Image: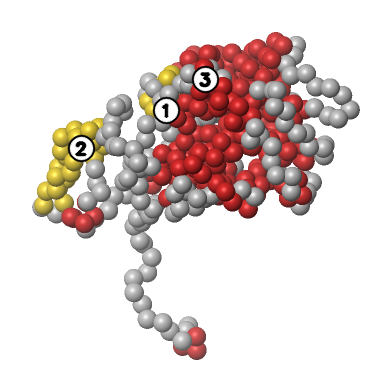
C-alpha cells in the first residue's frame, strides 16, 4: 500500500441553515487545493452536486499532472514535450508503471519482458473470426480484450502483486498484436505474428502493413512519428475512460475486464474520436481558398458548425502535445512526399487564421493534438476506423498505471456517486383494473 502524500492546507467553513461546518483543506504537490467533503454527508445531511465531476477530485494520484490554464502536461513530473523529443514509448511505459525513468539494465529487462509477451493465445484467432467482416475495430477490441481473462487465468487475482505485474506486462505487450489483428481482420488480410528482434512500434507497423507476398521494411521516420503519438496519448489524468477503468476496478473486477471497460468508454465520439472528426472537417473544407468561408460559418452560431481539433475541455491554452504532433506530421508528409497534401495546407491555413482571429483567441480555441494526429495517421496508411483503436493501444499503459495505483490506495472505496432525486414521491400501488 502506498502512503498518502496529501498535506493539510488549512480549513474551509461552510454555512448551512444557520450552522457552520469546518471542512479540512488538502494540498498536493502541484495544482489547486481541495476541500475535503468526505464527512459532510454524515455531519450535515447534505450532498454536493457536480455533474461530470469537473470540480471533484475522486482520488489522490502521482502519475499525471495537468494545468490546463498554463498548457502543462507532465508524466511523473516530466514535461510531455521532453518525453516526446527524447524518450520512446516503451521507456514512457516504464515511467508510468514504476514512477521513474529506467536505468539501462532496467530498460533492457523491461524490453525483454514486454517483447516476449507480445504473442496471443492461438485460440484467439478463432475468436476474431466470430465477428462479422465489417465489424468496427473498436468493437472487436472491446470483445477480445475482455476475453483475455478467459485465456490467462494465472494473472486475474488482483490481490496478488505478482499477478498484477504479469497482467500489466501482458496488456502492454499484447495490445499492439490485438489492434493489428483487428486491423488485418477489418481489411480481410491474414494475421501477422510479432517478431522478437523488432522494437515495440516497429513490430506494430509490421503486423499491420506486411503481407506474406513480400518482405516489409520498417521506415524509421514513420515509426518515430507513431511512437510519438503513443507517448502523447499514454495518459491524461482522470479523463472519462481512465475514470471508467478506476470505477470498474474499484469493484474488484479483473484487469482485462477493467481495460475493456476503458476501451468501451474511449469509443465514444466525445472522447476518443476527436482526431477522426478533425480529419473529416479538413476533408469537408477541401481546399485552402474555402477556409475563410468555413471560418465565417463557424462564427455564425446559427450554422451549428464546430471547429474540430481546436480547443480542449482541459487546456485553456495551447495543447502542449500539439507542437510535438505538428513536428511529426511534417516529418511524415516530407518522408512520403506528401507535403503538398491539400489537407495539410488546409490545416496550416486554418491554424494561422484561428491563432490570429480575435473570435478564436477570445474563446481560447487553440489547436489540440487531434488537429494534426488525424492527418499523420491517414498518411501512415490507417483508415479512420482505426484511429480510436490506436488511441486505445497507447492509453492502455496509462489505464494500467492508474488501475495499479487505485488498488494500492488505502483510501480507495468502491465507486458510488450520489444523485439528486427528482422523481415521484412515495405513492401507493393501484391495481390495473382501477387505473385511469
- Asked if the residue at tag 1 contacts the one at tag 2, i.e. Cβ–Cβ closer than 8 Å, the answer is no
Residue depicted at x 69% and y 37%? 119
Mark earlier in primary sequence (2, 3): 2
Q: Quadrant of residue 337?
A: top right
Mark earlier in primary sequence (2, 1): 2
Q: Quadrant of residue 213?
A: top right
Q: Which residue is mark 1?
A: 99
Q: Which residue is mark 3?
A: 105
Which tag is nearer the camera, tag 3 or tag 1? 3
Where is residue 397? Give x, y as percent: 53, 34
Where is residue 174? Give x, y as percent: 64, 37
Q: Is residue 2 left or right of residue 25?
A: right
Is residue 111 visible in the rendered image? The answer is yes
Mark identifier at residue 25: 2
Residue depicted at x 22% and y 51%? 39
Outermost residue toward the bottom in this view: 433
Where is residue 422? Give x, y as percent: 36, 62
For disc 3, the neighbor class at 10 Å (few under 14, some 14 to 19, many from 20) is few
Amino acid at each position: 500500500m502506498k502512503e498518502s502524500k496529501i498535506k493539510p492546507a488549512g480549513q474551509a467553513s461552510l454555512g448551512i441553515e444557520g450552522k457552520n461546518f469546518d471542512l479540512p483543506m488538502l494540498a498536493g504537490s502541484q495544482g489547486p487545493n481541495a476541500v475535503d467533503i468526505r464527512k459532510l454527508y454524515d455531519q450535515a445531511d447534505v450532498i454536493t452536486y457536480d455533474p461530470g465531476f469537473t470540480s471533484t477530485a475522486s482520488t489522490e494520484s502521482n502519475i499525471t499532472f495537468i494545468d490546463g490554464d498554463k498548457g502543462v502536461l507532465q508524466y511523473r513530473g516530466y514535461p510531455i514535450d521532453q518525453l516526446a523529443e527524447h524518450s520512446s514509448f516503451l521507456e514512457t511505459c516504464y515511467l508510468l508503471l514504476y514512477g521513474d525513468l529506467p536505468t539501462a539494465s532496467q530498460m533492457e529487462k523491461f524490453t525483454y519482458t514486454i517483447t516476449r509477451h507480445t504473442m496471443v493465445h492461438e485460440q484467439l484467432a478463432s475468436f476474431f473470426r466470430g465477428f462479422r467482416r465489417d465489424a468496427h475495430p473498436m468493437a472487436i477490441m472491446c470483445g477480445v480484450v475482455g476475453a483475455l481473462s478467459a485465456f490467462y487465468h494465472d494473472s486475474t487475482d488482483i490481490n496478488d502483486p505478482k499477478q498484477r505485474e504479469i497482467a500489466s506486462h501482458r496488456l502492454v505487450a499484447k495490445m499492439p498484436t490485438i489492434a493489428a489483428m483487428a486491423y488485418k481482420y477489418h481489411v480481410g488480410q491474414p494475421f501477422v505474428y510479432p517478431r522478437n528482434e523488432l522494437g515495440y512500434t516497429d513490430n506494430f507497423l509490421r503486423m499491420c502493413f506486411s503481407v506474406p507476398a513480400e518482405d516489409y521494411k520498417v521506415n524509421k521516420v514513420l515509426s518515430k512519428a507513431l511512437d510519438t503519438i503513443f507517448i502523447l496519448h499514454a495518459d491524461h489524468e482522470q479523463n472519462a475512460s481512465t475514470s471508467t477503468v478506476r470505477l470498474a476496478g474499484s469493484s474488484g473486477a479483473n484487469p482485462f475486464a477493467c481495460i475493456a471497460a476503458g476501451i468501451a468508454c474511449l469509443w465514444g465520439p466525445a472522447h476518443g474520436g476527436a482526431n477522426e472528426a478533425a480529419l473529416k472537417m479538413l476533408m469537408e473544407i477541401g481546399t485552402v481558398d474555402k477556409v475563410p468561408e468555413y471560418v465565417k460559418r463557424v462564427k455564425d452560431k446559427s450554422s451549428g458548425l464546430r471547429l474540430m481539433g481546436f480547443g480542449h475541455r482541459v487546456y485553456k491554452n495551447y495543447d502542449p502535445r500539439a507542437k510535438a504532433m505538428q513536428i511529426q506530421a511534417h516529418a511524415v508528409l516530407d518522408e512520403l512526399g506528401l507535403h503538398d497534401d491539400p489537407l495539410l495546407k488546409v490545416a496550416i491555413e486554418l491554424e494561422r487564421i484561428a491563432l490570429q482571429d480575435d473570435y478564436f483567441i477570445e474563446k481560447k480555441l487553440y489547436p489540440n493534438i487531434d488537429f494534426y494526429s488525424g492527418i499523420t495517421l491517414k498518411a501512415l496508411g490507417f483508415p479512420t476506423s482505426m484511429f480510436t483503436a490506436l488511441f486505445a493501444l497507447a492509453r492502455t499503459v496509462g489505464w494500467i498505471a492508474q488501475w495499479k495505483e487505485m488498488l494500492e490506495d488505502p483510501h480507495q472505496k468502491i465507486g458510488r456517486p450520489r444523485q439528486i432525486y427528482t422523481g415521484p414521491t412515495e405513492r401507493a400501488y393501484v391495481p390495473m383494473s382501477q387505473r385511469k
